[in-house]
């Protein structure tokens, strides 16, 4: 039995007319008829009733069609996977990400990916949560590292890690020596935070709401490193993920005992569009990277 016989039989079974079936698969009608007769002979059973009103399938033909459809679907899936293996080692991926990932997560991730796939080019786009969600929904970016707070109907999102947020104070602040604090304890402090369009700000607002606390916001920014620098300058306190690049600033990250302050982070893509092989390669790399082992250079607090 040959693969071409299965494809020919599927065409005949679906179209139910030899002439049109032959045209659809670009063979002559006589060649198609001979192939079907040979297939029936090899199987030792009649698959097709040939009559003046067209073609009908026998009971055996209906059963055989079920298996043929499944076999050909599996073959197509295998061919797509092989295409990714063959083509996914080169190409271009458009990757969008939140501002807060640019200083610690993304450089580590891209460096490791580039070591394995040096021929894949990554085009980067950094923006706020609302804009990134719009880009993904409109198909203007392949993949996006973002919070799950920006989803819509046509956006698929897979969880990667949970990011803990800390109260950030100058190292000489009265709370700096504490093992943990409740958010209500900093209600009287001037708050430095992200602009409202960022998912990090959404988590901050929700956390303070849970704490029934409403501190005065004295600055809203676009970059977590800027916020950390302003805390170091004693302009206020903040609620941020722990950022390795800020360790030299003279600030202290204090765990929050109440409420739990965490942000779920994942990778998103447009579910209505087919990713190119390079994008599939990067998507698979990122998901595997965060499932089952702690990424090199990433502190425990980023994964808990």
Image (spheres, grey):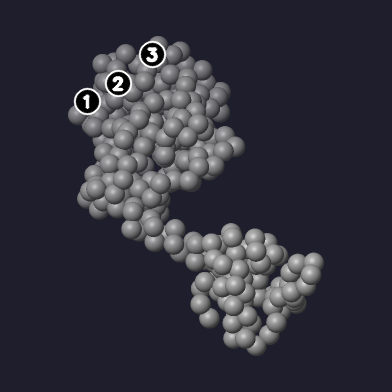
- Cα separation, mark 2 vs mark 3, equals 10 Å
Picture layout, residue 132 above or below residue 295: above
For disc 2, the marked residue is 226
Q: Which mark is residue 249?
A: 1
Please tell me whether mark 1 sits on a helix, a strand or a loop: helix
Please tell me whether mark 2 sits on a helix, a strand or a loop: helix
- Cα separation, mark 2 vs mark 1, equals 11 Å
Residue positioned 53% across, 43% down in the render: 271
Name the spot of residue 184 as percent of width and height, x first. 48, 24
User: Mark 2 or mark 1: which comes first in sequence?
Assistant: 2
Name the spot of residue 38 as percent of width and height, x first. 59, 82
Picture layout, residue 45 above or below residue 299: below
Q: How would you rate the neighbour count of disc 1 (Cα within 10 Å): few for under 14, some for 14-19, many for 20 or more?
A: some
Name the spot of residue 33 as percent of width and height, x first. 62, 74
Asked whether 274 or 24 is in front, the reply is 24
Q: Mark 2 and 1 residues: CB-CB less than 8 Å, in contact? A: no
For disc 3, the marked residue is 219
Q: Mark 3 and 1 residues: CB-CB less than 8 Å, in contact? A: no
Instruction: Using the rendered image of the protein, determine whether residue 283 is visible from the camera's viewpoint.
Output: no
Picture layout, residue 263 above or below residue 231: below
Asked whether 256 or 161 is in front, the reply is 161
Q: How would you rate the neighbour count of disc 2 (Cα within 10 Å): few for under 14, some for 14-19, many for 20 or more?
A: some
How many marks the image carries: the answer is: 3
Eye-nearest disc, 3 or 1: 3
Asked whether 91 or 24 is in front, the reply is 24
Residue positioned 65% across, 71% down in the render: 65
User: Mark 3 or mark 1: which comes first in sequence?
Assistant: 3
User: Mark 2 or mark 3: which comes first in sequence?
Assistant: 3
**Residue 47, image quadrant:** bottom right
Picture layout, residue 192 above or below residue 74: above
């Amino acid at each position: 039995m040959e693969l071409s016989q299965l494809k020919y039989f599927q065409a005949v079974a679906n179209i139910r007319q030899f002439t049109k079936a032959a045209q659809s698969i670009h063979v002559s009608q006589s060649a198609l008829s001979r192939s079907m007769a040979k297939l029936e002979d090899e199987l030792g059973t009649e698959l097709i009733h040939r009559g003046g009103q067209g073609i009908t399938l026998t009971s055996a033909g209906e059963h055989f069609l079920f298996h043929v459809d499944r076999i050909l679907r599996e073959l197509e899936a295998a061919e797509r996977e092989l295409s990714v293996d063959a083509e996914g080692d080169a190409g271009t991926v458009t990757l969008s990400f939140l501002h807060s990932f640019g200083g610690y997560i993304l450089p580590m991730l891209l460096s490791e990916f580039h070591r394995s796939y040096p021929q894949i080019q990554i085009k980067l786009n950094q923006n706020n949560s609302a804009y990134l969600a719009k880009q993904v929904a409109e198909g203007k970016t392949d993949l996006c590292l973002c919070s799950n707070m920006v989803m819509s109907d046509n956006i698929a999102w897979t969880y990667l890690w949970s990011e803990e947020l800390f109260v950030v104070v100058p190292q000489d602040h009265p709370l700096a020596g504490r093992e943990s604090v409740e958010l209500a304890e900093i209600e009287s402090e001037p708050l430095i935070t992200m602009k409202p369009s960022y998912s990090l700000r959404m988590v901050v607002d929700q956390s303070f709401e849970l704490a029934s606390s409403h501190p005065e916001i004295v600055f809203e920014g676009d970059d977590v490193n800027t916020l950390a620098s302003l805390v170091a300058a004693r302009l206020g306190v903040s609620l941020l993920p722990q950022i390795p690049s800020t360790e030299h600033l003279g600030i202290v990250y204090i765990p929050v005992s109440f409420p739990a302050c965490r942000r779920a982070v994942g990778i998103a893509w447009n579910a209505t569009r087919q990713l190119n092989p390079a994008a599939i390669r990067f998507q698979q790399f990122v998901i595997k990277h965060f499932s089952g082992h702690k990424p090199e250079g990433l502190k425990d607090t980023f994964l808990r």
